[in-house]
Structure formats: structure tokens, C-alpha cells
Amino acid sequence: MKERSVTLRVNGELHVFNHVPVRKTLVQLLRDDAGLTGTKEGCGEGDCGACTVLLDGEPVNSCLVLASEADGKEVLTVEGLSREWELHPLQQTFVEEGAVQCGYCIPGMLLAAKALLDENPSPTEAEIRGAIAGNLCRCTGYVRIVLAIQRAVASMSRPR
Amino acid sequence: MLPDFELFEPRNLQEAITILGELGGRARPLAGGTDLFVEMREGRTRPEYLVDIKGLEELKGVTVSEDGQVVIGALTSLRTLERSALIRERLPILYDAVSQMGSVQIRSRGTIGGNLCNAHASADGTAAMMALGARLRLQGPQGHREIAIEDFFSGTHKTVLNGGEVLTHIHLSTGVSGCGGAYSKYTVRKAMDAALVGVGVFLQTEQNGAVCRVARIALSSTGPRPERAMRAEETLVGERLGDELFERAGEAAAAEAHVGSNWRAPEDYSRHLIQVLLPDVARQAWKRAGNQGREGS
């Protein structure tokens, strides 16, 4: 086949896309068809991590996943992180810590960090750096990004 | 978008074998896609057909066979292996290798079978499994066969898979007591970097870990494909293990490796790295061999 329909849940909402070319990647489907442009395409080869989304909870480079491969699965993009007008703790601490400069890597960085915290709520600095090793940032030098993730760990473990 | 291709999604292994057999060299099987899509984007491969085999559940997961071997489905993701308590406890050498590969994102998609079938010289998982003496099960239109991992590679990026043949499972023996293995690689960066040199060492010891009974040493990123360092192995077998012996094995491996100069490193530097890295890896393997069966190991 050259085309197929793709059904997937994006940020909790069910989407059906018809006549999707099989050579279309997931990042293109999200940006062009679902209109979710928060996910960025950088290198297109799985090196930079800007296109990171969670596919059934696992961080993946959406430039290296066919839209058809995501059929029947659940996708979380940066647009699905906040609840109503409340930022996700990671988003909040990235703002507070000044972890964002140009911002291009941040959607992928946030999702890589979320995947880590979902699995390991109290990571060491080395574990944080390992989890974001596939997300390149050319502005910040990573220091404030790591600090922001550590701050999110602290804020999420505090009883509300 | 990727270059144009037609997609097949077989529902079981037999269907996949039939489709791949009929399409021959014009088709590529699609597992994790982390190498294949990059090759397609860069124009290094132009398949007319992709056969997405990810739906074949029978090729996924880690199990233990009746005779105590660990059996890994070829479509098991690197991330699944990294997370597997069974792998961590019984085959820590494989954990060493897969947990150092690519990024979390790549490990979530990439499969151990894909790592083998792409036949890259720098394949960490392959070198670790070579040190473990892995046997590979292949299934094709003419039935199945089982081969040693060393016999799987026919050249740079080439395997002995015939048309329609699929790597289905990897069989690994965990060994009896007194066995241990380790893998380590030297990279310029701490992550997301292919090895300049990778070394895997498996030891079976006797006399309470004092003497080497069996040694298997595998090198990655040296020649056109991962290779065994037989001379270095012979240096160890039958001898009393210790630092001096490991240094000698390192020298032997550095001398025998089929390494040439490339853009990553000149030949003498690669040989130097093998010599320095091997004793460290061997010490770690020895430590694990000594710890076998003890609580908390």
C-alpha cells in the first residue's frame, strides 16, 4: 500500500486521518495534519531529539517513526503537558530556572524529562543527563535545563 | 517525507517470509527504523518496498528455555533489554552494551535483531553477544537453521541471510557458576557516539575463580565487522587470572585486531585503545565471574 488511514490518540483526543501516505513521518502528521506545531523537526535523523514525543509513554524521535507505525497508539506532545491553564511542573520550573533560550529544543527536552520522571521520580544528576543525552541544545549549555529538572523533581515530590 | 516506497504489514512470520522472498532485493524489512530511515534519507539505500515486521509478536520478548538458555526475540527493543531484570542479573555484559547505545529515544525504537542485521562494525550489542557465544535462529522459505553469531556476517554491512530469510531469535547461554562477562567502549563523547573501540570479555573460571577455563573476547569498531580476538583468548585459557595476564591479553588483542586507519582514529591509536581497554573489561568480567551465585551480585 502507498496510503492508509491512521487512528491515534493525541494528547487524550482520538484522531482519524485518512489517505495518509505511508512515507509520511509521525512528526509531519502531528504538525501538518493535526496542527500541533509544538513538536519541531530538527535533523530528521534521530540525532537532535527536537521531535521527541511520547509514543505509548516511551520517548521516541517522531522523525524516525512512520505515521502508519503510530496507528492505534497514544501520543503525547508538548501541547498535552499542561492542564487547562496550569503548566506542568517541568514547564513551570523551566520558566523559573531560565532554562529556555531560543526554545527550539524545549518541547523535546520536556518530553524526554517527563519520560524519565514517569519512570524514576527521584533521578540523580547523572540519570537526568543520561535521559536527555539524545536532546541537543545549542544555546544553554544544559546547566539550567538540568537544574530545572531537579527543581521539578523537588516540586513534584512535595505534598500539596 | 521519506523517499517513495510501498509498505507491507504482514500479520505473522510466514506471511513476512513469503513477502520478503517474493520481493527479494527490492525490499527491506522494517524493524525499529532507526538505521533504515536514516539510510533512506541520506540516499544510501533505496528500497522499493518496506515490510514492517513490528506486528510479529512471536519475535518479541526475553524468555528462558527449558535448558536454561536465555532466548531473545529479534524484535525486542534495546530499551526492553536495558530494563530487563533477567538480562541485568544473568547477562550483565549485554546490559553494559545496550544501555550505552544511542539515546533513550533510539533505544525505545531500535531492536536487537536490527542491530545484528545491519551488521555495523560498531554494533555494541553484537560484540557483547559474540563474547557470549550467541547462536542465531533464522527462518526462511526453506525452513529454519541455527548458526553461530560469527558466521552471520559476510562482509561490511552484509549478512548471510538469504532472500526471505528472517532472524527470529538469539540464543544465549548464561553459563554455569564461575562465569562472568563485561563490555565497554571508548567514545569521544559520553553518549550518542559510536565506539572508537569496543571490547567484550566473557570468562568461565574454575578453582574458585582463580583459573580461566574458557575465554571469549570480541572487538567492535575495529575491522569491517565485529570480530573475535582468538590469540588474546588463548593467552588466558588455562592460566591463573590476574592483572599481568590481562595486560598480556590486551597486547595480544591489539596486535591481532583487523584494524585499519579511518576518519575516526588512526590505526596505532585504535590498537593502543584495545590494549588499554581490554584489561579493564577483563577485570570487570572476572569480578562478575567471582560473584556468581552470591547474594546481591
Image (cartoon, rainbow, N blue to C red):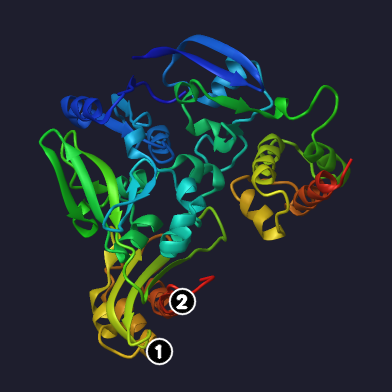
- In-front residue for pair B180/B199: B180
Q: Residue at x 42, y 89 (%)?
A: B243
- Does dot 1 land on a helix, a strand or a loop? loop
Q: Residue at x 51, y 51 (%)?
A: B83
In the rendered structure, find residue B291 and report the number of the disc placed on it: 2
Is B94 displayed left or right of A88 in the figure?
left
Q: Is residue B249 visible?
A: yes
Badge 2 or badge 1: first in the primary sequence: 1
The residue that mark 1 highlights is B242
> Disc 2 residue type?
Asn
> Residue B288: x and y, percent?
45, 74
Please tell me if label 2 and label 1 are on a single chain: yes
- In-front residue for pair B178/B235: B178
Q: Residue furthest top?
A: A18
> Disc 1 residue type?
Gly
Q: Residue furthest left?
A: B142
Question: Dividing the picture into quarters, in which one does residue B231 lie?
Answer: bottom left
> Residue A160: x and y, percent?
89, 40
